[in-house]
Image (cartoon, rainbow, N blue to C red):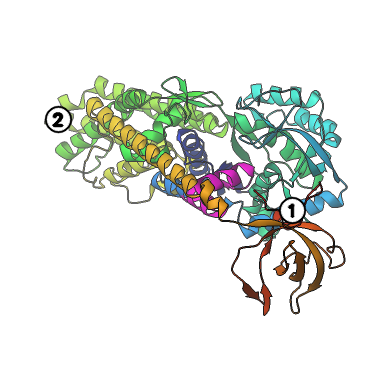
Amino acid sequence: MSNSYYLTTPLYYVNGVPHVGHTYTSVLADAIARYKRMCGLEVCFLTGTDEHGLKIERAARQEGLTPQKLTNMYSTSFRQAWKKFGLNYDEFIRTTQKRHRKAVVEVFKRIQENDYIYLGEYSGNYCVNCEAYTAADCETCPDCGRTPESMTEESYFFKLSAFQEKLLKFYEFNPDFVVPATRMNEIVSFVKGGLRDLSISRTSFRWGIPIPEDERHIFYVWFDALIGYLAGIGFASEPEKFEKYWPAQVQLIGKDILRFHAVYWPAFLFAAGLEPPRQLLVNGWWTVDGEKMSKSRGNTVTAEELTEITQADYVKYFLLREIPLGSDGNFSFDLLVTRVNSDLANDLGNLCNRTLTMIETSFGGEIPEPAEMESADGELRQYSSETIDLYRKNFDNLQINKAIDNVWELISVVNKYLVANEPWAMAGEDSKRERLGTVLYCSAEAIRIIAILLNPIIPDGTAAIFKQLGISEAIEDQRINSLTWGGVKQGSSIGKIKAVYPRLDAKEFMVRVEEKKKEKEAASAQKVKEVEAVAKKKTIDIGDFGKIEMRVGKIISAEAVPKSDKLLKIQVDIGAEVRQVVAGIGKEYSVESLPGRLVAVVTNLKPAKILGVESNGMLVAASNEGKAVLAAFTEPVRLGARLK
C-alpha cells in the first residue's frame, strides 16, 4: 500500500479576493492534510489559482491593467490569506506558470494522438461569468442566472460523447467517487441524459494558452485549469514525483463546479491514458446571516476580514464544526462568538486551566504520579481509547464535524470526571494526596489526547496546550494512528499557564466587525472611483477626435523594406497627392495583392523614418488574433474623402 497521499483544493478563479467560501475549502483541506501527516503518510497538499479566460481579460481591461498584472495581484492575495491562516500547503500552482503550460500541451498531445480531438465550429451560448457553455434553449445561465452571450467560432472539439458508457461504468464500480451520495446521483443522471462533444478552444480572445501548431486558438479555460492538478506534482516535468502522488486521493470542490470535475475531468484523463482521482469531496455554499453572499449585496466576508478581526483558530474551528459534509453553511459573526465562547473558552479552555492550575498549586507544577486506578479512572481511560477509534473512523471518512463531535464528547466526559471526583476538595489533605494525584494525572493525560486529536483542526492553540503540559516534542510530530493512553510523563514540569482560548466580548467584537465593514465599504467605493477614473482617462471628446485627419486612399504600389520580414513601403494616392507610407502588414498581405486596394490613411501624422525609410502617414488596420486586417470600403468612394 502506498504511503503517499495527494489532495487538492480547487484552483480558485482570480476574479476577486478570497472570501469565506474559499477559506472553508482551504481550511478543510489543511485539516485533512495535517491529519494524514499525523497518521504517518507522505502528504502533498496542493492549492492554487486559475488565471485564464475571457472574464479575466475583460476585468483587466476594465481596471486598466494587463491580464498578467491583474492575476498576479489576486493570486498574491490568496497566498497571503493562506499564510495568515497558517495553512500548510505543499504546492501552489498558477495556470500562468511555464510548468502548467507544458503539462497542458502534453495532455492535449496525448488526447490528440488517441484521436479524441477534431476541428469544427461552435455555435451557441456561453456564460462569461461561469466560463461555461450553456444550452441553446437557456435564456439564463443555470448556475449564476446571468444572460449568456451568443457566439459562433471555429473550435477544436473533445469527443466527450465517446466516454458516456465508460463514465457510467466507472461510476458504477466507484460509487464513492463523488461524495456526498446526492451529488453522485446528480452526475449519473446528467451523464445518462447524453453527452455532447465539448468545445475546448476559443479564437475570440487571447488570454490563455495557445494550442500548439495552431496558435489562433487558445485552450478553453476548463480544459486548461483542470490540468493544474497534474502540473503541480510534476506531470511532464518531474515524472518520479508525479508517479509518487497521482492519482489524487481526494479533490475538494464546490458544488458549482461539480460537472467539470466529475464528467469532463475523468473523461480528459481517460482520453490521455491517465487514471482519474480516487474521490471528489463536494462542498456546499456559504450564506452570510442567512442571505446569499454577493458583491452586489455588499455582504461578502473576506479572508482578510476574518484574520484581522479574530485569531485563525477561532475561524477554523467555527467553519469545520458548523457544517456537515457536503451541506450548505451559514456564516454569522454572532454564531462564531457563541461557538467560540461555549466550546473553546468554556469547555476546552476551562478544562485545561483548572487541571493545570491544580497541578501547579498542589504538586509544584509537576505531573503527579498516579496511584492505584479506581473504576472511574479506568472508565475515563477506556472512553479516551474509544474516542480515538471513533475519531479516526470519522476523519478517514472525511466526516470532520463528526470527528470534532467525538472529541467534544470526551471533553465533556473529562469535565464530568472532575466534577464527580472534586479534586479541589482533596487539595491540602495529605490522606487524599495520592487520589488527588491520580485524578489530575488522568485529567492531564486526557487533555494530551484531546490536544493531539484537535491539532489538525486548531493547530495553534493545541500546540500551546502541549507546551503547557510540559511536553517538549512538537505536537504535529505525534502519531494519531498509534495514539494510546499514557503519554504524559510523571514528574515532568508543566509550562506557564495561560488562557489559550480567551472568551470573546460579544459587544466589543461586534464593534470591530462593524468598523471593518465600514472600512471595506470605503475601500470598495474608492475602487469604483479608481475604475471610473481609468475609464475617463481612456475617453476623448469630439474635439480630440477631430484633430485626427483620415482620408480615403488607393494603393498604387508596394515593395518590401530591406532587412524586415513585415514592413512594406507603400505608395498611396489620396486624391491631392501620392503619399509614401511604411506599414507592418507584410506577413498578412503580399506586395502583389495590394495595388488597387482602397484604404483609410491617417494623413496628418508627423513624418517618421522606419529602418531608414520615410513614412508620411499610417494605414488604418484592425488587430484580429494578433494579425493586421486593413480597413476597407464596400461602396464606391472618392479618393481623398475625409473619414468622419
Q: Amino acid at mark 1?
A: Ala
Task: Give the alpha-carbon distance from disc 1 to disc 2, as whole Å.
Answer: 95 Å
Image coordinates of residue 611 in percent, x first then y, are 67, 78
Under circle 2, the secondary element is loop
Residue interval drawn in magenta = 48-76
Direction from residue 315 to residue 155 in the image, left or right: right
Q: Main secondary structure of the magenta part?
A: helix
Mark 1 against mark 2, which lies toward the viewer?
1
- Viewer-nearest residue: 435 or 121: 121
Q: Residues within 10 Å of mark 1 (few under 14, many from 20)?
A: few
**Magenta span includes 49:** yes
Image coordinates of residue 391 in percent, x first then y, are 49, 30
Q: Residue furthest left?
A: 428
**Magenta span includes 42:** no
Q: Which residue is mark 2?
A: 427
Q: Residue at x 59, y 68 (%)?
A: 606
Q: Earlier in the sequence, mark 1 or mark 2?
A: 2
Q: Which residue is mark 1?
A: 631
- Viewer-nearest residue: 92 or 136: 136
Q: Residue at x 81, y 42 (%)?
A: 158
Residue 263 sits above or below residue 623 on the image: above
Res 187 seen here: yes
- Viewer-nearest residue: 614 or 531: 614
Q: Amino acid at mark 2?
A: Ala
- Viewer-nearest residue: 356 or 350: 350
Image coordinates of residue 208 in percent, x first then y, are 66, 51
Identify the image quadrant of residue 138: top right
